[in-house]
Every structure is written in structure tokens, then in C-alpha cells.
Amino acid sequence: MSAIHTENLTKKFWRVEALNGLNLDVPEGAVYALVGPNGAGKTTAIKILMNIFGPTSGHAEVLSVESTRIAGQPFTSIGYVSENQELPEWMRVGALLEYLRPFYPSWDRTLEDDLIRQFDLPRDRKLSNLSRGMRMKAALASALAYHPKLIVLDEPFTGLDPLVRDELIQGLLERAEESTILVSSHDLAEIESFASHVGYLEQGRLRFSEELTQLVERFREVQVTFDGAARLPEKPPESWMQINSSAAVVRFIEDRFDPERTRTDIRGAFGEVRDVTFSPMTLREIFLAMAKAGRNAA
Amino acid sequence: MKQILNIFRKDLRRFWSEIAVSVALLVTYSWNDVRGWSGERDVAAYGGIAAIVGYQFLSGLVTVLLPIAWAFLIVRVVQGEALVGDRQFWITRPYEWKKLLAAKVLFVVITINLPLLIADVFLLAKAGFPPTHYVAGLLWMQLMIALILILPMATLATVTASVVQTILAILGVTLYMFGVAWLASVIPSSSFSGPADSLELILVIVVCVVVILWQYAKRKTAGSRWLIAGLGIAIISIVAVAPYNTIVSHKFPRIAAGEPLPVQLALLPAAPIGDSDAPEKEKEITVQIPVGFSGLAKDSIVVVSGVMVSLDAPNGLRWNSGWVSLGTELFPDTKDIMQIHFSLKKAFFEQVKSASVKARISLALTEYRDKNRRDFVTPHGEFLMEDVGYCFAETSYRREIHCRAPLRTPSSMMITSDLSANTCWAMGGESRVEIRLIVKNWYQNSDSGPAELGISPVKNVDFHLWARNDNGARPIVAGICPGTPLVISNPELVRRFGTELEINSLHLADYRLRESDSGGTGFGIRLR
């Protein structure tokens, strides 16, 4: 069962295509990281899911509700926090929470107090007088205190110091069991520490979407050492990226790693070689490799 | 309801300073309004001109500031949950648009309508009119304020993201209105736009309501702005293509053959003038055609509501003024000549001035019957005048009857007086009339609603008499003072009709208005 499901979702701003046939499924209970370079369409996708924009074509369902119908009551089950959200800055933290309380039947006063304590939020301080990090924490507290089924976070960690990031992530993880989380971010190192699924969006298209463990298993940095001078293969397999050579070594990134199959491919491409090593990659390295590959392809 | 009250309470807390300012201005307005009813008399007697000027300045200032404060409050509260943009935190919260809209309506009702209603009730009671007798009128005033101020301001606030943007939008709308007014001024007959005006008003109200509902329901700002732009284009189109001649002929149908006219009209010979050549510097020539009127019944009044003049010269040249809206009153016992004057381009005039021109003067006339005539001697002190309200004769400054009326001024009331019986003191340089000289003043209010638009429900009405000394001698004593005998009546509309005067051979050169006679160029009627 998907908490979020989209089919051929397209969004055009005049002639600019921000999303191009996005097919996305976020399983219930997942912590789904939507990653991609700037302008990839992450924020546009999230705003369509939240019915802030309407799609140009295609459709999306969020918690089994058509995205274009998400307004009012469905938001009692959704917590949305964005880096560029305009909060009512004239309000004090306590007044904001007090104001929002009656909107949510499932608002949990105990949880509210816990979040205030956990995030070290001053109830009597105006939002306009808070730092960026504190404001994000206040926004997150106000989006978590009613046990939302779905938490949607658009670039929540941008510009925050590591301590605040940790606090936010900790706050999220504690809620992860009862919610589905969709988070878009550039902060891949942080995402890697808590995401269960990852989707890579580029130029409005979803390049891949899978469980993080599978993804990390799938990508390897491969180093092939020759006895003599290294030579580049004439027709490398499609799953090899960023092939380069120096002296007696050829390096590339394999995006469909399987020890047996990859060794067979190497033999087919190079013949006999002296040594082959496979190194696991971090999410950040995978992301960079995908981004570069996309740029080169473009 | 819980959500409505929650949003409402939040807005009250947030905008308390704006609310306080508008209430303070309303209190100031009410205090100054009360001061004005009886105050002017006392001010004139005890405070002098400076006090009157002070009162009028404050009155003018508060009358301008109070609607601005209300408009600001409306814009602020609507934009408290801004409908323009995609970053507002509230759009991803469980707000229900109907409840949000209801909360905003509740806020406006509680912070604008209710204080105004309380002030109006207070003012009516203070002026001596039991408020319970005027409930419908008080509610009507609230409706007028809602349609004229609240609805347009709320509409602009829903399609703009900030107060600055709203101010720019208001400036844009103001410029547009000037543009439409200019367009109307250059389109012939457009002053007879009655049904077109009503259509425009209905369109404005409908579009405002649709935009507000659409914005709250869908936040389709681009679409809403296009809708407003479409309204602007529709109004221009209506002004440009409205069938004004049809409107006039429908409103003022030609009188049936054989049916007697309430007034007989006849072209009079032109007054001789020496030189018919126009001075070189003039670009327009004013032509004045004297038309005599007679046969008006003693209790009959005819108003020249509009005139259209068309000229056909033998050389094929034509000119048509289009219908021009006027309001010249023809009474049976005063003047009997009306001078219809209009301006022609000098080039046209020079081409046709010596020719025998065929002229057609079309008149849109409204006939009234003077009814309910009663003699009235102006009392001392405050008195109750039927159909008006509480009045007093102000003797020291303006020499007029100053009244305060509940909700609206009289629909139609005429004051007739023989100046030879005037009881006012002659001020410096004035001369007293020795022979019978009848002067009239007719107060009309075409507004048919139970109340007039305005902040105060207490309307000031000043009845005065005025007469010009045609001989150029000293001014005439013509005020209303205690003891001045008057005849008060209520002219009632009988019918509207149209008629034409055809002149087959008109020599325009004979009718050119000399500069010394000129009372201004353009189109108009002077009575002689």
C-alpha cells in the first residue's frame, strides 16, 4: 500500500517543464528521501502532492486522496514543513501551537510538551525573533504534535548547523514508526543515516526509486588494474558510468553490481586483467555520479 | 464553528491596533457630527468663523481617514491568511475555506459593521429620532457600506499579496476609472447611461463576489486577476457601445399625436449682433438659440432633462451634439425664455454660418405636479418640519433653514417665497425687494433607497433662497429667517416624454453668442 502514488505527473510553468511524467510510489511506513540536483523538480513534486499547485497532467494520490482534493480535513493527517514556508512570524511559539491545537482532533498535548522540551523551544518568544534553525524546529513541532500519518519535509536541513540537524532528525526518527516520511534534501549524508527508500529526480524525471539498502548494494566503484598500460573498452556495458583511466588502472562506476556478472562483463570488455576491486559507495557518491552522468548525457 | 471562532480570535489579537484606530476615528467622527448639528449655530454665535473652519476641517479629515482605516483593516485581515502565493503556512493546514471566509466575514462584521451600527444608533437617538423606527434604513446603510467599500476592498485584497500591492492595485483602479470617465465624456449621449450604469454595477458586484469565492475555494489568482481584467474590458465595452439614443427614446417616449404638451415651446428671434465674424484666436464658436416656453399649468413644473441639437447644412455638412444631460427647471411663474447654447468648431461654423441650416432640437422633458402645497412661517428656535426632521433658522451667518434628517434627505421638496415679504436683516450692501418677486428652491434626491450612503445616518439639509439682481444693482436680501413666510410643496413625477423643435431655416451667424454675453462655452441652458 502506498502512502503516496503518482502517475505520469507533469507540471509546466509556461513552456518550462518542471516535472515530466513522474511515477512515484512511497510505501506506507517508509522514510523516503527524494534527492536530485537543483531544479530537478523536487519542490514542484511536493507542492503538487500538497495541492499547493495543480498538475498540468497526470494524477497523484496522497493517503488515498486525489492530490487536487487535498484541502481542509486531509491535512489533519499530514504534517508539512518546508525551508521557505512563511510562518506567522508575529506569533509567539506557544501562541502558534495554541492556535493550531483546535484544528487537529488528534493533537497530543503531552507530545507537544515533549517536542517543546526536545527542541528546546521558548514558548514566549516570537517566531520573528527566532533563528532559522529554531524556526524550523517550531515548524516541525507544530507538524508533529498531532501524530500525522504522513510527514512531508521539503529541504528541511538546508542552512542548518549540524546540532540542529541532529535534533530535527532525532525528532523525526522518534516519529518514524507511526508515520510515513517524505523528505527532499541535498543533505545526502544526513539522509543516508535515516532514509529507508530513496528516489533520484533529475530534469523532472525519476531516474530511480528503491530501497536504500538495495541502492547501496547496486552501486560499486570498480577499479581494474592491468599488467601494462590501461586501455578503455570500445563498447562498455550500459551500467558502467564515468569510465576513466590512468597509467595501468581503469576506474568506473557500476550501477547494477553483481559480483559474478560484473566480473564477466569486465572480462568481456578488457580480457585478462591483473586485479579487480569493488568499493561500496556512499549515497553522496552515488548521487554525484548520477548527477555527472546526467549532465554528460545532456 | 470552533474553527471560525479560533481564526476570528487570532485576527482580533493580531489586528487590535488597527481596530483601535478605526474605532477611535469612528468615535471622533460621531462626536464631531453631533457638534455640527447644533454646533454650527453656537459656533457661529460664540466661536466665530475659526471654530466653523475647525469643525469642517475635522469633519472632512475624519470622513476621509475613517474609510481608509476600514479599508486598511479589511486588507490586513484578508491578507492575514494571504490567498496569493505558495509559501503561506496556512495552506497546508486543515483550514476549511468556507470557515476561513466565514471567520473573515465575522471579523469585518464585528470590527466594522457593528461599531458603525452602534454609532449610527447613537447618532439617530442623539438627533431625536427613535432608532427602532429606522431599522430597515440602518441595515440598508450597512449593505451600502458593504457593497461600496468592503466588497471591492476585500476583492482587491484577495488577489494581492501585500498591502503595498493592494495600494498599487487601488491606484490602477483609480486610473482606470479616470480613463472610463474620460471615455464617457467623449462619447455622445453617454450622460444618459441609466440602464448601462445599473448593468455595470451588477457586473462589478457579481465579479467581486465570484473572485472572493473563487480565491477562497481554489486560490486561482491568475484566473481571478483575468476575471477582474475582463470586468474592466466589459465596462469599457458597455460605455462604448451602449445604445444611448435608444435608452433616451425609451425613457422619454415621443408624445402621442394630438396629446397636449404641458409646455409650449417656440423659437424666438435672435438678438441682433453687430459683427458676425469670429475673432481669429477662437477655436470654438458658441451659438445660442432662444426658445420661449409658455402654457405651463399653475401647479406644473417641467424639467429639461436633456437636449440634443442636430444641424444639417445644404452643402451636406452635418453636426450632432448627442444627448446632453441637463436639469433645467421650468416654472410657470418665473422666467419664460430658455437660451440653449452649444459650441461648434470654428471651421464648421465658418462653413455653415451664412447658409440656411436645418436645425432639430430634441428635448427630453420630465413633468412634475406640485402637490401638497402648504403655507409655512419660519418659526424661532428648533422646530419639526414634516418630511424632513428637526430644523432651525440660522440667522447670524447663512440665513437658511438648517435641518437634520433621519437616514435620507427629502425626495422632492420645494420652497417658494416672495422676497418682498422677507424678514431677514439686510447685511452690508444688500437691498430689500419692494415688489413681489417669487424665488423657488427645489430639493430633490433621486436615491430611492430607505437610506443614503454615508457614515452618519443623520443627514444635514440646508434650505436656502437665492436671487440674483438682474439689473446689476446691490445684492437682494434673500435668506430665510424666523418669520419668513414660505410655501412648501412636494412636486411629484407625472411623466417623462420627448419632443422636438424643427427649424427649417436657421442662420447660425445670427445666433452666435457674443463674448460679452458669454456665460461659458459648452452645452447648456440659461433661463431669461
Image (cartoon, coloured by chain):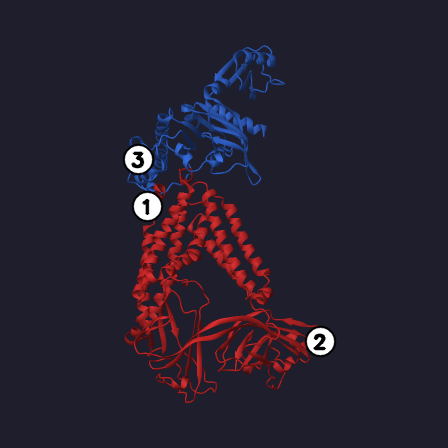
Chain colours: A blue, B red
Q: Quadrant of residue B127?
A: bottom left
Whether residue B430 can be seen here: no
Give the residue drawn at x 60%, y 14%: A269
Q: Nearer the viewer, residue A269 or B200?
A: B200
Residue extending farthest bottom = B434
Find out whether the residues at labels 1 and 3 contact each other: C-beta distance under 8 Å.
Answer: no
Q: Chain of mark 2?
A: B
> Picture quarter containing residue A205?
top right
Q: Position of residue B114 (x, y in %)?
A: 34, 55
The image quadrant that residue A29 belongs to is top left
Residue type, mark 2 in image = Pro
> Contact (CB < 8 A) between labels 2 and 3?
no
Residue B489, placed above or below residue A132: below
Chain letter belonging to callout 1: B
Q: Residue at x 56, y 65 (%)?
A: B190
Q: Nearer the viewer, mark 2 or mark 3?
A: 2
Q: Chain of mark 3?
A: A
Task: Rate crowding at label 3 as few (under 14), some (14 to 19) or many (20 or more) other CA atoms within 10 Å.
Answer: some
Amino acid type for the residue under numbered disc 3: Leu
Report whether mark 2 lies on the same chain as mark 1: yes
In front here: B10 or B148?
A: B148
Mark 3 highlights which residue? A121
Q: Which mark is residue B314?
A: 2
Instruction: Count every numbered label the image shows and give the total.
Output: 3
- Residue type at mark 1? Arg
Left-right relation of B347 to B62: right
Residue at label 1? Answer: B9
Nearer the observer, B218 or A190: B218
Element assignment for label 2: loop
* Looking at the image, residue B156 lies above or below residue A167: below
Q: Is residue B29 shown above or below B208?
A: below
